[in-house]
Amino acid sequence: MVIRLANVSHDYGAKGLLSGIDLHIAPGAFHFLTGPSGAGKSTLLKLCYGELRPRSGQIELFGQPLGGLSRDGLADTRRRIGVIHQDCQFLDHLTLAENVALPFVATGRPVPTRDLIELLGWVGLGQHADALPPTLSGGERQRAALARAVILSPEVVLADEPTGNVDPEMSQRLLSLLVELNRMGTAVMIATHDMALIRNAKAQVSARVLRIVDGTLQQAGADL
Amino acid sequence: MSRRLSLILRGGDSDRVVPSAGLSALLSGISAAMVAFLAVFALALSVSAGQLALRWSDTLSQSATLRLSATPSEIGAQTEAVLEILRATPGVISTRVLEIDEQRALLEPWFGPDLPVESLALPRLIEIIESPQGFDPVGLRLRLATEAPGAVLDDHTRWRRPLVQAASSLRLLAWSAVVLIGGVMAATITLAAGFSLAANAPVIRVLRLVGARDAFIAHAFTRRFTLTTLLGSTVGTLLGMLAFAVLPVAGDAGFLTGLGFSGLGWAMPLAIPPVAAVIAWIATRAAALRALRRES
């Protein structure tokens, strides 16, 4: 199991947000996570990659209890999880290629330049390697975020509203990239309230749709 | 690939992940320069105070003065008697009766150059140079009391001790200032590093997102602040040394004579930048690791 949540609850103060969440993400699985704004989709993703610790319940990442991971252990575990945020979270003073290569730099490993060039080409940004992030469009930034998320060949990619700031055509292109990644064996979970994106995925991949309703996780359908 | 990319890809420029144009980095560099400038002065004061204590101690420690008062008719005979006693005293290397011109020079600062010294009944002064082992002042005083009642032996102890103590205290004070300056530098850099860490919280968040360990993040900030401090303190130290180099020489007449560096002493302030860099490294690393643990 890549990620497992058992009876997880979380809140920000007095208001309960998530309650009794059970979630299993198996290797190679494809999940959509839906729900209205403020339902707790981003919070659930943060729990899945250890940015947040649950108020109660158990979380296992790659078979290791989250609570038992040291700080360095958690950092090492995050290298096995690719994360894409809606706002991309780039270092604006570094070029696009430097941002994409950041996981290698931050883990003290030499960057495989050829792989980097290929990866930038895969997401269609080969010509923008030296551009600074603020000069890129929303779609280009999202594709760069995807490239950064997968450069270490993670076992799972968690995407938080990856199509929130892009047009439908770019949404489809991003989805295609994520589906292609999934076909190579990477588990994918996309948090989105974009139902059109989910419908478009129907023809491409077998995915489960999970929906957060009143703080609980419900399965909206075993197959699209 | 661009040159910038190749730099970061080689992994030799990992501190570039922290934006360079931070106000805190600039302020810490300027602070390091100012503190290093002050440290040069404190170091100079300490060195000079040490030299002063040594000089006063050495100059007065192996000499004594004998003051002989007698009537004009007896002064010659008593002088001869005293010199005879001194020659026979173990530990006395040489003696010398001060000339009238030397006595005039001693009195000139108080009475001016026109004092008719010849017409005054001044005591006769005899300078005594001791061997390193010195003489027995108690025994000498007893013999003088018997054979030259008007002779008073001054072995300089009552002058030398407070002077050496004062100079030693001054040196201690100066070294305390050096230590305090180091503490101020550490505190300043810690504050600047804390400010920089807070200002760069989004950068830290991204680094954590991509799997950076605390040690990597702390190193990025530590290296940046260490280099900034090294550069700032080098500038401050060189300016401080330049200030001493252009100080007018006071001659040989004043208390501040010798304040500064001479010979190999000029190498001492050059230790300030590396010491400052070490302080910055320790302070920044501690601040960074503390902040990273607090934010988790």
Image (cartoon, rainbow, N blue to C red):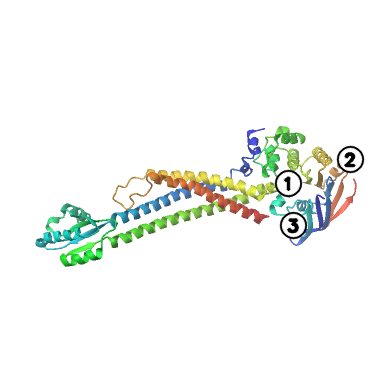
Q: CA distance from mark 1 to mark 3?
A: 17 Å
Chain ID at mark 2 = A
**Residue assigned mark 2:** A203
Residue contact at pointers 1 and 2, CB within 8 angstroms: no
The residue located at (84%, 47%) in the rendering is A31
Amino acid under disc 2 = Ala
Q: CA distance from mark 1 to mark 2?
A: 31 Å
Q: Which labelled disc corresponds to residue A67?
A: 3
Q: Residue B28 location in percent, x, y?
A: 54, 48
Residue B103 falls in image quadrant: bottom left
Q: CA distance from mark 2 to mark 3?
A: 39 Å
Residue B243 falls in image quadrant: top left
Compared with residue B15, is residue B46 higher up or lower down, i.e. above or below?
below
Pick whichever of labels 1 and 2 is earlier in the sequence: 1
The residue located at (41%, 55%) in the rendering is B174
Compared with residue B127, is residue B209 higher up or lower down, i.e. above or below?
above
Chain ID at mark 1 = A
